[in-house]
Amino acid sequence: MKQVIQTLRRKDAEERLPVLHLELNYELATLYDAMVENDEAKINESKEKLESLRRELIRLEV
């Protein structure tokens, strides 16, 4: 039973990783735009989203 659960988790991770990479790229572009605009609120919001995405990426790649 444990092997079945591990297989399902691996499949979910394989499907989520490409989407996660796209989300990271989009959020990096958003952060860049906020930095160009010198908008501290948007910069902090983007940094928080990037941190959350980073944690998820690390969790999925382990």
Image (spheres, rainbow, N blue to C red):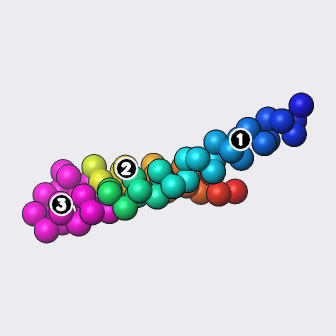
Image quarter hosting the N terminus: top right
Q: Is residue 24 above or below residue 3?
A: below
**Looking at the picture, how far across and down is residue 25, in whole percent?**
37, 61
**What residue is rendered at 51% in x and 55% in y?**
18
Question: Any mark on residue 34, and which?
Answer: 3
Give the residue at mark 1. Answer: 9
Q: Are marks 2 and 1 in contact (CB under 8 Å)?
A: no
**Looking at the picture, how far across and down is residue 56, in whole percent?**
54, 49
**Looking at the picture, how far across and down is residue 12, in whole percent?**
64, 42
Q: Is residue 9 above or below residue 61?
A: above
Q: Are marks 3 and 2 in contact (CB under 8 Å)?
A: no
Q: How many marks?
A: 3
Q: Tell whether position 27 is magenta.
A: no
Question: Any mark on residue 49, and which?
Answer: 2
Q: Tell whether position 39 is magenta.
A: yes
Q: Are marks 1 and 3 in contact (CB under 8 Å)?
A: no
- The residue segment tinted magenta is 28-44
How much space separates mark 2 and mark 1, taking CA atoms? 23 Å
Q: Amino acid at mark 2?
A: Lys
For marks 3 and 2, the one nearer the N-term is: 3
